[in-house]
Each structure stands twice: as structure tokens, then as C-alpha cells.
Amino acid sequence: MARLVMKFGGTSVADIDRIRNVAHHVKREVDAGHEVAVVVSAMSGKTNELVAWCRTASPLHDAREYDAVVASGEQVTSGLLAITLEGIGVNARSWQGWQIPILTDNVHGSARIADIDGGELIKRFKERKEVAVVSGFQGVHKETGRITTLGRGGSDTSAVAIAAAIKADRCDIYTDVDGVYTTDPRVVPRARRLDRVAFEEMLELASLGAKVLQVRSVELGMVHKVPIFVRSSFAKPEDIDPYGTPPGTLICNEEDIVEQQVVTGIAFSKDEAQISVRHVPDKPGVAAAIFGPLAHASITVDMIVQNVSADGATTDLTFTVPAGDYRRATDVLEKAKGTIGFKRIDGETEVAKVSVIGIGMRSHAGVAADAFKALAGRGVNIRAITTSEIKFSVLIDAAYTELAVRTLHSLYGLDQ
Amino acid sequence: MARLVMKFGGTSVADIDRIRNVAHHVKREVDAGHEVAVVVSAMSGKTNELVAWCRTASPLHDAREYDAVVASGEQVTSGLLAITLEGIGVNARSWQGWQIPILTDNVHGSARIADIDGGELIKRFKERKEVAVVSGFQGVHKETGRITTLGRGGSDTSAVAIAAAIKADRCDIYTDVDGVYTTDPRVVPRARRLDRVAFEEMLELASLGAKVLQVRSVELGMVHKVPIFVRSSFAKPEDIDPYGTPPGTLICNEEDIVEQQVVTGIAFSKDEAQISVRHVPDKPGVAAAIFGPLAHASITVDMIVQNVSADGATTDLTFTVPAGDYRRATDVLEKAKGTIGFKRIDGETEVAKVSVIGIGMRSHAGVAADAFKALAGRGVNIRAITTSEIKFSVLIDAAYTELAVRTLHSLYGLDQ
């Protein structure tokens, strides 16, 4: 007997038929003797509709009212799933964020969870064998009692937070893919599913573009030591052996991965733009002068490369921003030209970032050097490099993205 | 300066454009210096959609989950109206039933309001000049903390209950008609709008088929002495003089109606079926033997007529049931034939009930006698008669309904 959280996203609960499919997944686990909390998103399309209404009502709307409106989507799904479960003989009840309660701060629209009391849910597992069907994405502010939402994709975060609160053995994220792959299978058909991946690696994979689940939920899983299992919601419930090992990827502690590879996966993102600020004075405070105004404009800066000055007086500073922020970023810098004192700005929007991730890198020398050599052999020019303990990233011309990813995927023995 | 509740139904908030129209109605009252609480229904069609989902999910669904699902409709509208109000410069915030809270009993699907604390709303009128936008139709069970709903049309009841809780001077029900008429204008084009009608009269008019507002809300208004003003939501906000007397009907205490007419209005219903139980033993307990099984089957019995027995041994008992329950009612009775001991059942579904209502009847003799004479003069056969202090009803062949209503409307001087 285990205690499980099962999370289903919008496409998995898009209509009553799919909700019925979800109910059978839940029943399978209940029949196997597990205690189950289910976390659901809004039916797909619903949240977009509600958001559009808020925007039409007033472009500058109050985030507290926005939260009250959009949280209704999850309320509908949790009620409908509870009804469906009871219809097939499974004890269940729905829980809204304010009923548990899932207490959050008051940053409406992207609130952070402060505390969840899992006591009542656990009590009902024991006393009534009742499945808890929890509305994802939503909470309640601990002081004002107003409805909050956790931001897009927040249901993943809800699920892991609930799992931590009820001390679940595992949090199953049912999604439209059957796990986390060594890289995007559309680019590398020989990409293979990872059986296990460490939290730290998943953080890098998720934030670098492997859109399987929200970064925040992985952080939360890491902090609270909740193993997260990514698996497919489209598998037929009756085809799954409840006592066997279903296909999927377990995101877990490093220590729980027996055979650690040097490299776990290759992530890439074409949504990057490169900005080089030329001939800035090489003196203390200049980096702050450049990145301060960008942060103020809420532009996220990623890879930052500053070379040691050649002449001792000026240097070049290169960094990347999301492609959609490129124009705004250069505008912000031009306005601050007087303060920063640079000569000119060079930019390039047709660039891509390719990242190689693996906890094993920490204890293996030369991992990055191998990559540079292999890429050079294929004629891929590297514009910039950044490294961290468990990954390194190269910025290249966007046209070479697929070639670079395939080259590195083979190089590190990730091909099937 | 007055304190007002303004209630808008589903058709008045059917889309963002109409919600904007509602917001301008609210702004007009705020600009006139009033303290305002608004009560809204779900966007028209939404509740039906949600109910249909519940039924598809499971025909025998848990009413507690049904309530969680359907209450979401009002949550959306209250949030959107608050956003729209703020967009036009009116301070506002939305309130869900559980936030105020609107405490109810636990009869999910048709809960009754137990208590509402209006303190916080009043405080915010004073301190922030804030409009309270309240989700109608919903509440929260005082012990379990689960969402409840008040049943169809419950938003009228919410509005009057909120008005009582905040000690409002008036509760304005905005609807698709501009008031309560002496009878249905589609049947009698010369019907006229009543300026004032007493609570007791409105109770009879509402329950007899004048579908302007929910009976329960009128009862509540009567108990808590909240004047209810029925008015049109389709009048353009800018065309209404906030200091003048808008067109509509005020439902109020009898004492506040200066010139009381003998007859206030004529109601009618074609949704009736007549059942006559022939030759039942004329002995104590027989009425219970007939109406017990019907009540048990949740069939509402209306006009009951039992004549004094002619032979001292048996009698006939006639009553009406809703037309939709006719078949079920006769089945129930046939099954209980052994216990009741009747000879046969006669029935007629093509009947109508026409009722004449007026508080003035209490002090005027011969009001009903005039009606019987006038109807006889037009060849309308009366099948049964029931009377109460302030109304009398006749059961006639359905084909004569319009003729009877027009005849009585003229007879009592109600024509324009």
C-alpha cells in the first residue's frame, strides 16, 4: 500500500469522456490498495476563455478578481471528477484551494504556496477510504481569504505541494508524453526515454525547454523529497498492470539513481537573442549599469559572457534575452547609453542555445571539451559558452541547431 | 443617500457587453451617492451547461459535488463585473458565498439561508466606498464548509437576503420585464403595470404563474420588511434619472399602499391536471390515504375539493397536480387502490386554473360571486373552486383560459 498523488492536466480532462478515462486510472490505483489524492487542471481551453473575458472586461484588471474568475475552471473539473468517481463506485470528494486550505502569499496571478494542512485528507483516507479530488492551480491568501492562483502550469506545483503535505510516496504527473527524453524526439528520432533523472538535472532540462512540467514543481519536489513520476494519461487504464512498473520517468534524488550517466540529456532553445555591448569601460559597476535597467524592465537575461579586457580600458559584454524581448532590451540599453558609456550594440536574433546536462559531469573532466571538438568537426561555430556544475551551454547560429543536437546526442552515447 | 441591493439575472450578464451595461447601471447609483451591493447570476446558458455535464458524468450524482460545479458560474460573473466596474472607475470587489459568508443548511441543490453577516460589507461601504459584487445562488454549509446552492432562481433569494443582512433600503430586481402586471400582457394587451403590490399579493401572483421573481425571495422580503423593486435591465443606464422615479413595481407592505384596489391581478396556469377520485369511503383518514402516497412521491397537490357526501357513505375527491406529474400521480393512486378503497379515477389534463388576487377582497363581499356570474355569462364552465382570504381560483377547460382572464380583467376594472 502506498500513498499517491495523481495529477491530470487540461487535455486529460477536456470533456466528460476523458474525465471518465481519468476516473478509471484513479480506480486502478484505489483497487490496488493505494491512498489517492488527485489534482486536476481546468478543461483545456477553459482557462484561455476565462482569461480572454477578463481582458475584454478591462485591459488593466485587478489580479484578485482575475484569480476569482479563472480559478472557477478547476472547480468545475474537480466536482465533475468526484461525481464520475462516485458513479463507478469510488468514494471521492472535491476540494477547493480554500477548503483544504492551500494557503498562499498574496501575489495574485502567480502566488506561492505558504502552507497546506494535509491532516483532514489523511484522516479521510484512513476513515472513509475517500479519494481527495483537489482543484489544482488555486489557493487562498492566508490573511484576506481571497482566491489566488499559482500562474500558468500551476497545477503541477499544486500536485507536488499536496504530495509533500500528505507525505505521499510519489507524485504521478499524467501528461501527453510518456516521460522525459534524452532530447526532443522530433529532432532526434533515436532519443530515448529516461527511466530516472535527478531533480537537479530535471531543473536544467525543464528550464531549458523540455516542456514536460513546471520548473517550480521540480524545485518543490527536490526540497520536500517527493519523487515525481512523469507518465502518459493516454495509456488505457485497463492496459496498465497496477503491480508492474509502468512506462515513465521518475524524477528523484541523485542517490536513488544507480547507474548515473555522465550526460543525461541535451536541451535546446531557439527562443533566444544575442546582444553584445561593445567597448564598455572596464570598471566596477558597469555590469550593474547594464543589467539593472533590463531587470527593471522585467527582461530575463540568460547566458552572460564577459571577456577579460585586452586593453585594460574597455571590454565587450555578451548576453542572451528571450527573442520576444530583443527589441525592448536594445531600446532600454540605448536609453541608458549615457550612464553605461558603451560604443555600440551588436545583436543577433537567429541564434540557439544548446545545453548538455548531466550530474556525472561533476566528476568527469573533459566532457565539454569533447563537445567543442565534435561541433568544430561538423563546422558548427560557437558564439558563446557558459558552464555550471552539471551543465554547459553553447550559443550557436539557429540554422545549426538540429545538427548540433544530433551530434552531441550521439557523442555522449544517448542514442537508442 | 440610500443603501441598495441591485440584482441582475443571467440574460442581463450574458456577455461582456451586457456586463458593461450592468456596470453602468451600478455606476449611476453610486454616482447618486448610494451604497450598493450587486447580486449576479451566472451568464445565461452557463448553469444549464454545467448541470448537463454533471448529469453526463453520472445520472445519480452527489448533490454536494453538483453544487461545487454549478456555483462556479456565478463566481465567474461576479469577478468579471468587479473587473468591469473598476475599469470605469468604481471601487468594487467580488464576494463568493463562502467569503461573506452566506451560511446555509446542508440541503445541497436547494439549500436555505441560515445566516448572513453583513458587517464587513457595511464597513467597506463606509471606509472605501466599495461596491460589493456578490455571487448569487450560492452559499456555504455552516458546519462542513462545503459549497451549497439555493436552487433555480436562487439569486433573487440571495439578493433579498443580502438586503436584509445589510439593512438595505430597497432591493432592486433587474429583469427582462419592467414590472409586475395586472395579468400577462400577451393575453390581455390592456394589462397595466402595477406601481405597488403587497407582499402577500405578490406571493399569490408569483406562485400562480407570474414568473417575475422567485416565491422564496418574496417571502423573505415580507419577513424582513425589505421592499423589492422589479424593474427593467434593458433600459439604458444613461436614460434613467437617478433622482426620479424609475418605471417598475414596488413590492412592499400592505400599509405602504395608499389606494388599495379590491382586485390587484389575475393569474393563470395551464400547467395543471385534474384528478377526481370517485366513490371513496366517507370516513376519517381517507384524505390522508390519498395524499400521503402522492406526497411521498414528491407530487405537489394544489386545489383540493371534497364535497359533502350525498349518501353519507361515499364521496368524490377532486384535486389538481402539475400536468407533468399526471401520469405518475394516477399510477401512485392505482397502486394504493386497496388501501384507499375508491371505485375509479377520472382525470383531465386539458384544464387551467385562473386566480383572482387582491388584499382588498378581505373587506369586500361578493367579489367571487361577481366572477362566477360573469364567467357564466360567457359560457365558461367552472369545474372546481377554491378560495382563500386574498384570492380565489377557478378550474376551467383550458380552451377558455384567455376568454376567462380577459373577462375577469375587465370585470374588476384592471384594463388600462
Image (cartoon, coloured by chain):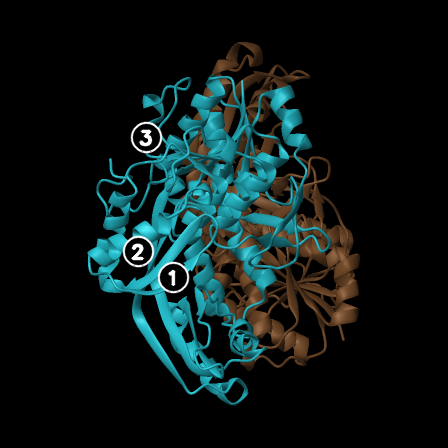
Chain colours: A brown, B cyan
**Who's the residue at 48% across and 57% down the image?**
A43
Location of mark 1 (residue): B385
Q: Amino acid at mark 1?
A: Ile
Q: Earlier in the sequence, mark 1 or mark 3?
A: 3
The reply to whether discs 2 and 1 touch (Cβ–Cβ < 8 Å) is yes
Q: Amino acid at mark 3?
A: Ala
Q: Residue furthest left?
A: B378
Q: Could you tell me which chain the residue with mark 2 belongs to?
A: B
Q: Which mark is residue A56?
A: none
Position above or below: B171 against B52: above
Residue A354 rendering spot, x and y as whole percentages: 53, 48
Q: Amino acid at mark 2?
A: Phe
Location of mark 3 (residue): B235
Please tell me how crowded label 1 is: few (under 14), some (14-19), or many (20+) other residues with Cα within 10 Å: some
For marks 2 and 3, give the CA distance.
40 Å
Please tell me how crowded label 2 is: few (under 14), some (14-19), or many (20+) other residues with Cα within 10 Å: some
Q: Earlier in the sequence, mark 2 or mark 1?
A: 2
Residue A141 rendering spot, x and y as whole percentages: 68, 39
Q: Look at the image and tell me whether residue B220 can be seen.
A: yes
Location of mark 2 (residue): B372
Q: Earlier in the sequence, mark 2 or mark 3?
A: 3
Q: How many marks?
A: 3
